[in-house]
Amino acid sequence: MYSIQFGQDTIPYTIKWSQRRKTVSISVDANGVMITAPAQTTEDKIEELVYQKASWIRAQLFHFNEMLDESHTRAFLSGEKLPYLGRQYRLKVFKNDDIREATFKFQQGTFIALLPVQIAEEQHREILLPLYEQWIKEKGEAFVRNRIHRFTIKLQQEPTAVKIKDQQQRWGSCTANGQVLINWRILLAPVSIIDYVLAHELAHLKYMDHSKAFWDTLGMLIDDYEKRKEWLRINGTTLHI
């Protein structure tokens, strides 16, 4: 394990040398910082590159640490953070004698929940999780349709429908009749990861398997899909509320 000191922060990193690589790559995920470098690259050269990218690396590490801190089961109490499109937003819960039924909305960068005063904290999750899920689905449908457009132009093929669903085992799927179904939880991930899932399912409009032709099509839509796929493999559990 290697490390650099950047201001008051220590940034640890791991180096993997490769005979096949032509350039140095830096990847950051929940497991830390990985540098993949051509075999002839010196440790000093790698350290210099890490210094050059230190601000970006620190920001990425902060993002992943924030996601991991919030990856426990939410109780939907005031002060907790809820994810949407890769960011965490504070939840504020208000109770009042005049409130007859629970409501949930997003306002000025904050999730706002209104509850009848008699609702106990132990009931918050049972009541607010379905409202949060419904909010994600409603907002996510328009967001997904907008993101899909850039891929269908390249693909020259449109899905017959796009639906946001509650899928327990998959991030997305493509049906035989051309419907693209997206797990609402993927909308909690960063936009680049959402794009990967969308492109993956759209590529199935042409190839309903995982043949070389399918992966070539996906690579045409997103050239770094392998990096995004790996992010989802490592961090997918953080998207469960």
Image: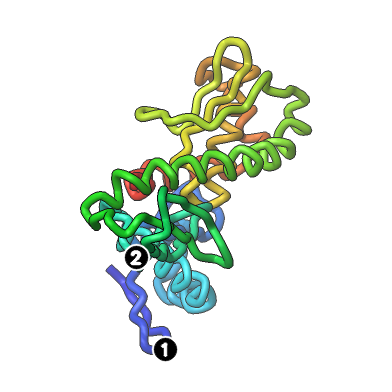
Q: Picture coordinates of residue 82 (x, y %)?
A: 41, 57
Which residue is identified by label 1?
A: 7
In the displayed structure image, the side of residue 160 where residue 156 appears, left or right: right
Residue sitting at the far front:
98
Give the residue displayed 55% in from the left and 15% down from the top: 175
- Secondary structure beneath label 1: loop
**Viewer-closest of 127 and 1:** 127
Give the residue displayed 48% in from the left and 76% down from the top: 54
What amino acid is found at the position of numbered circle 1 in the picture? Gly
**Viewer-closest of 76 and 143:** 76
- How many labels were placed on the picture? 2
Residue density around tag 2, few if under 14, some if 14–19, many if 20 or more, within 10 Å: some
**Viewer-closest of 210 and 15:** 210
First reached walking from the N terminus: tag 1 or tag 2 = 1
Give the residue displayed 73% in from the left and 36% down from the top: 149
Which residue is identified by label 2?
A: 78
Give the residue displayed 39% in from the left and 41% down from the top: 130
Residue sitting at the far left:
122
Q: Picture coordinates of residue 12 (x, y %)?
A: 33, 72
